[in-house]
Amino acid sequence: MSLGSGQFWIFVFTVAGIYAMFGLGLQIQLGFAGLMNLGVVAFMAIAAYTMAILVVRESVPLWAASLAGIGAAVVFGLGIGLTSLRLRAEFFAITTFALAEIVRYVATNAAGLTGGTQGTVALAGPTTASFYNTQWLTFQADVQGWIHDLTGASVSNEVAMLVIVWVAVAAVTFILQFAVHRPWGRVLRSIREDEDVAAALGKNVLSYKLQALALGGAVTGLAGLLYAFQFSFFGPLDFDPLTTLIAFMVVILGGAARNWGVAAGAIVYGVLYAATRFLTFPPVSYLSSSDRAYLRLIVVGAVLILLMAFRPQGLFGKREELALD
Amino acid sequence: MTEFLQLVVDGLITGSIFALAGIGISLPYAILRIVNFAQGEYITYGAYCAVLVNIVWRGNMALATVAAMGGVAALSVLLEFGFWRPLRNRRASHFTLLLASFGLSLVMRGVLFVIGSSNPRTYRVNVFQVYDIGGVRLSQSELIAVVLGFVAITLVALLFAKTHTGRTMRALSDDHSLAAVAGVNTDRLIVITWIVTGVLAGLAGVLQGLLQNSFDPNMGGNLLLPVFAAVILGGVGSAYGALAGGLLVGIAMQLSTWSVLWGGLSPIWQQVVAFVVLVLALLIKPQGLLGQARLA
């Protein structure tokens, strides 16, 4: 694929949209409530796996399986909250990080349940390749039809996916933007700034934090479902800690507590990451392909460090809105 | 019964490594409130310093261990001046430091993969020598690991309890500004903290390398999970707690495979066991075994 290819950019922007949804889930927990959840990837994994397992194994209709997936992510969020919220912020971060690693560990090793290292392709056993997205493809075709009816343009199913993803992102962003300016959002932000003050005013801090974890879990779960639909199978490696870091990069680039910034951050990140594909000039071109994968690791790490050193409030954020300690 | 003893001894061996690594997480947290996600990579770099001496330069294992401890201590001090201190001077929040350490861990791991290659490494030790102590069997590597591990743990305990440096370190972790006002040279103590952290990380790296027999640049990162469990279990910021938590997590992980309990879990679930223990402990005593009630 070349830089000028339309298909390539459709792909980049679709994935950026999924990152944006992922970032919005983290935004509710981190940006609103100040919860340093280093395990957000687990919500994605749980929603996607629940959906895929129900569709393939139990022949549950896709919409019901998707709802169950989001429900599972919400339950997981509440479980994390009830066990770990009493810890200090840093150790809440560690515990969530570890819980996400455990989820990935289970996905890798409980092959009977999840398809193991091969991923969802092996869900129906090692001999038959299994897919969960036939009903999704029908839905995509419907969307193609609606777009044709509305605008008269015939678009590919990739464009249909792009539209679905960004409509969903816009809807969630709009809802969040609405919610922050309600009393609910104001209480959450007051908890982020000073828990004791919020508690002294009679607000149930634990309950609000649990709500943030549950709602963030639902949105992140939705991101997991979109991810699963974009790639017609997935495995444990899709949900490693590096993926959690993507959500943080997206939120931080956009500026913590900036709802519209999340989409912008996701596009910046998505385009930058896609651009590393075109690092084909010396000295990079002298490296073997596996070394280039490690180079990517180094670049992501270095960007994160530089961002933390020079612009912790993100590209579009306000410094005073990032008092997360 | 022999099986039980064997598992407890195995648990003490892995647990002593968790304890050493756990102090490396606990100490910088107590002194600087840094949660260092790159600690796993400090450990891996220790193992690879020893690879350089033991495999590339064909030196013996004792020399390699000393090199690992010295090498990581030097690296650790270097990172204090080149990484942590500049970030602190920019008044980075705890959250910023934590994410930056995550970035540091990626950079360190990536660099090691590029220059050290992803090929599995094995130290030149005699893997066939097995000792039988009252029915408990130990390989040569395991014996070295358990002896060195416990010597190091004792020395650290002595450092905190008996020396002036150790006492000022504890004072600093209790109340940073009070200690500074009382005339404690905080900058010097911070450097000492990183040296202790580095020496222990280097040692933990070599011991884990010996124990695993074959390892790659992901080794230290893979240790992070049980080590975090040990640190939180023992009580955040408490060095003694990290020791106790490490041993406890090590033993719990090994005992989960004991055939008397539910016929014994498969060893692949050991990492999960470490965290189940932790979550249970959090529900019963959220401040950890030796931690104080939540202050901030």
Image (tube, coloured by chain):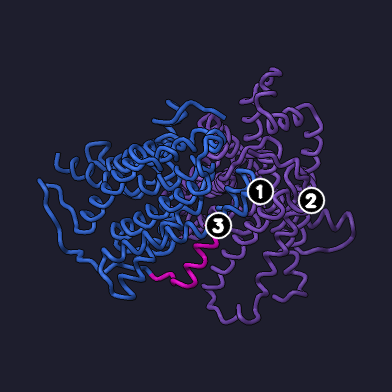
Chain colours: A purple, B blue
The amino acid marked with disc number 3 is Phe
Q: Is B190 colored magenta in this rendering?
A: no
In front: A68, or B190?
B190
Label 3: which secondary element: helix
The residues colored magenta run: B104-119
Q: Which mark is residue A316?
A: 2
Q: Given the current orientation, which residue lies at the most extreme right position?
A: A151
Instruction: Work out how far the residue at label 1 is from the one at label 3, CA to CA, in angstroms.
Output: 40 Å
Label 1 or label 3, whichever lies nearer to me, is 3
Q: Kindly indicate whether the residues beneath marks 1 and 3 are on one polypeptide chain.
A: no
Q: Identify the residue shown where x is 83% and y is 63%.
A: A154
Decide which of A319, A240 is in the foreground and name it: A319
Q: Amino acid at mark 1?
A: Ala
Q: Which residue is mark 1?
A: A223
Mark with earlier residue (2, 1): 1
Left or right: residue A288 versus residue B161 is right
Real-space CA distance between mark 2 and mark 1, rounded to the nearest whole angstrom: 23 Å
Which residue is drawn at the image coordinates 75% and 64% (left, top)?
Answer: A10
Residue B29 sits above or below residue B204 on the image: above
Would you say B80 lies left or right of B281 here? Answer: right
The location of residue A224, given as percent across then percent down, is: 62, 49
| Residue B248 drawn at (x, y percent) | 32, 38
* Left or right of B193 in this view: A217: right
Picture layout, residue B199 above or below residue B273 = below
Query: Dot 3 corresponds to which residue?
Result: B81
Q: Secondary structure at mark 2?
A: loop
Seen from the viewer's position, the closer of residues B164 and B71 is B164
- Chain containing the residue with disc 3: B
In contact (CB < 8 Å): disc 3 and disc 2? no
Q: In the rendering, at what x and y percent does residue A244 appear?
A: 59, 51
Q: Is residue A264 visible?
A: yes
